[in-house]
Image (cartoon, rainbow, N blue to C red):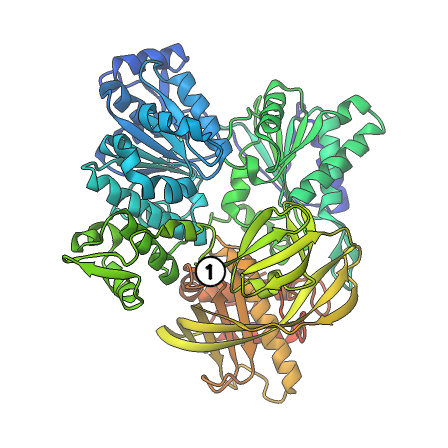
Amino acid sequence: MAVTSEREPWKALLEAASRDGRLVAETLEHARAAELEPLPEERLAPELLQALRAAGIDGLYTHQAQSLAAADRGPTIVTTGTASGKSLCFNLPTLDLLCRDIRARALYLYPTKALAQDQARALTELGPRRRVRPAIYDGDTPRQARASIRRKANVVLTNPDMLHVGILPNHPAWGDLFSNLGVVVVDEAHVYRGVFGSHVANVLRRLRRVAAAYGTEPRFLLASATIANPAELAERLTGFEEVEVVERDGSPRARRRVAMWNPPLSDEALGTRRSALGEAAELLAGLVAGGARTICFQKSRRGVELLSRLVSERLAASDPELAQRVAPYRAGYTPQQRRELEQRLVAGDLRAIVTTDALELGIDIGALDAALVVTFPGTVASLRQMWGRAGRRGRGLAVYVAGEDALDQFFCRHPDEFLDRPVEAAILDHESEQIHLAHLLCAAHEGPLAEEDAAVLGPRWKAYAEQLVDAGELVARRGRLCLAAPEDYPAARVSLRSSSPESYAIVDTSSGELLGTTESARAPHTVHPGAVYLHLGRAYEVAALDTDRRRALVAPFAGDYYTQPKRETDTAIVRLLDRRRTLGVSLSLGQVQVTDTVLGYQRKRVADHQVIDFQVLDLPSSTFTTQAIWYELDEELLDSSLPIGAMLGALHAAEHSQIAVLPLLAMCDRWDIGGLSTNAHPQTGGPTIFIYDGHPGGIGIARQAFARFEELTADACALVAECPCRDGCPSCVQSPKCGNLNEPLSKAGARRLFERMLTRAGAPATLA
């Protein structure tokens, strides 16, 4: 579609990219006028009406008005676009309550500290000063200030981690909050998916249970970016049977160009392309020189720093002053540094900012002209939220710069489908066994478990609790279940970012600093001896893996290589949950036991990915139970005349390509998924492909794959069939996490297999 405007500083850049083939698709999102309703004077407290008018708010967008009405009826989730005024959707009912009831309290939950700080400022600026006393309570809150916050604040802003480990287990100290809790706000709800979401769902159920013990039933108000299943997500997060959805966006939107940018091939036979970072640097420098205020998103912190430097160097050659107006912004900076950058951006002193997803969420940094996203961020929902930052003065540009990854190239070969693609469903499983067991112990610490807890904890809690009784961790006393060791503090052992209760600490031996943790099941292949481990954009080499003390000892690393482990994986079917016949295969869903043994690792040069050598390791195997799908292939689908090596290559390539496209159907990353392909599994007796949830217990990824297996197979077929490489590349069947170091692989064999499967269903063999 041709799109022109005299005011657009990017016109020449896009025209040049269209001529040389970099611009693979372009479309126009038309401007949208605001849909307004007058302030509901009879509904809002007079003090609040006065404060709103003093702030220049004389009307509400339709979704804000609808949210206010919905909040009166019960739990609500608002899911509208970026910068659509979602905060007012939950601030209005909260501030109204505080104006009417001097004792009322509210609890706001945010996934990041920066968001909590941003919202605390907004509440202070908007709310009637005599009525609103917001305070942030997180790990950075000085200890001397905490007692005062518990006693005086009527809006407590915190994060799920602090609620889990600091507030709920110490609820007697928070009696004023829980006795008067009227509203719970859960902002950026789409972030709570996968392992993190499964944990947060349990934390919110514990919150409801503690509030009920104090005699309160707070209203739950959630806000989310646009996702496919807002009602389901809200219901699974909170445990309510029905949550009302407000999704029609009444906010205005500027006209915005959307462009897909694919770096040119550098080697057609290998399928390799010019660096996405190099392309983005060139494009961003051109936008800055043309006067566009731009935000650029990049996945890694190291990439943020490198891209910012590349852009500044390009600009310095012609305009040194302009080069100083580009800055990186990422986690790891001090709060003061971050606030200074935000203020420079809002004031217009900065022309461009390069960031990780630290600015993807709803921090107010003002309107911008353009937004660049370098490589696919993992979900269409995140991509659209990043794009939503662009658009002011009646114009905007959103660009997606593709990388070499399979999904990036899949989208570039299907640009129309991609631009129209619906956002994904956010998945979580609050009853994932290991996660649920851990939180039952936390709940028992907060108060003995009883039959009536089924209303909040769910109908299956008793069966899980009996496992804890059998393990000696819970005991029955007077018809209730209590901790066997009353002095225990189980919340301290549960990380909301991990599905496994057991983890390894990663310790920097040069400073003694705890860098982070990793699940026990993942430790042998992420922090094995000799591994190069990346943390906050810095490289460390693992000196030792102490299995007795569960810690990995690392030291700063300045080498020019990275490592890739070689491992052997076995799967044992533990329990069949469901089975169906489709695409000529027997498809099963169930529990499997995965056993991983790391045999050694390759060292590869960063510059050209060439193998330097292979180092042998002698490590114990790790085992975990999770959910998986597996499908058994009959002789008609496979070419029985093929040598075993060729058959294994076809199965292996098919497994990789399905794992590569599974994130299209579920909000997950390929690193959350594992797989195994074999020509003769001992339990099925024949050729079988397993795709399993990489987190102990599972978080719902396998269930999504089982339900949408036909789409999964069609997308994988298109990925393989349309990739221009000859024998397989990172854009189709090669995996960056393959334990067999991408051997053997047969791209042609995988394509034949998928085409035969799809023909069985009457579907086209490939998606052209």
> Could you say which is closer to the camera, residue 105 or residue 263?
105
Q: Position of residue 701 (x, y in %)?
A: 44, 60
- Residue receiving disc 1: 502
Quarter of the figure that contains the C terminus = bottom right
SS of the residue under disc 1: loop
Name the residue rendered at 65%, 26% in the picture.
Answer: 293
Q: 437 above or below 384?
A: below
At label 1, counting other C-alpha atoms closer than 10 Å, the crowd grade (few under 14, some 14-19, many 20 or more) is some
> Could you say which is closer to the camera, residue 497 or residue 487?
487
Q: Residue furthest bottom?
A: 641
Q: Position of residue 576 (x, y in %)?
A: 36, 75
Q: Position of residue 635 (x, y in %)?
A: 52, 86
Q: 310 above or below 639?
A: above
Kind of residue indicated by mark 1: Glu
| Total number of numbered discs in the rendering | 1
Q: Evaluate whether residue 85 shows in this view.
A: no
Q: Evaluate whether residue 309 shows in this view.
A: yes
Q: Residue furthest left?
A: 478
Examine the image and state in which quarter residue 305 appears: top right
Q: Residue furthest right?
A: 317
Q: 483 above or below 386?
A: below
Examine the image and state in which quarter residue 468 appears: bottom left
Q: 94 above or below 494?
A: above
Examine the image and state in which quarter residue 133 appears: top left
Lateral position of residue 399 relative to residue 452, left or right: right
Lateral position of residue 205 relative to residue 500, left or right: left
Q: Position of residue 353 (x, y in %)?
A: 65, 31
Quarter of the figure that contains the N terminus = top right
> Could you say which is closer to the camera, residue 537 or residue 281?
537
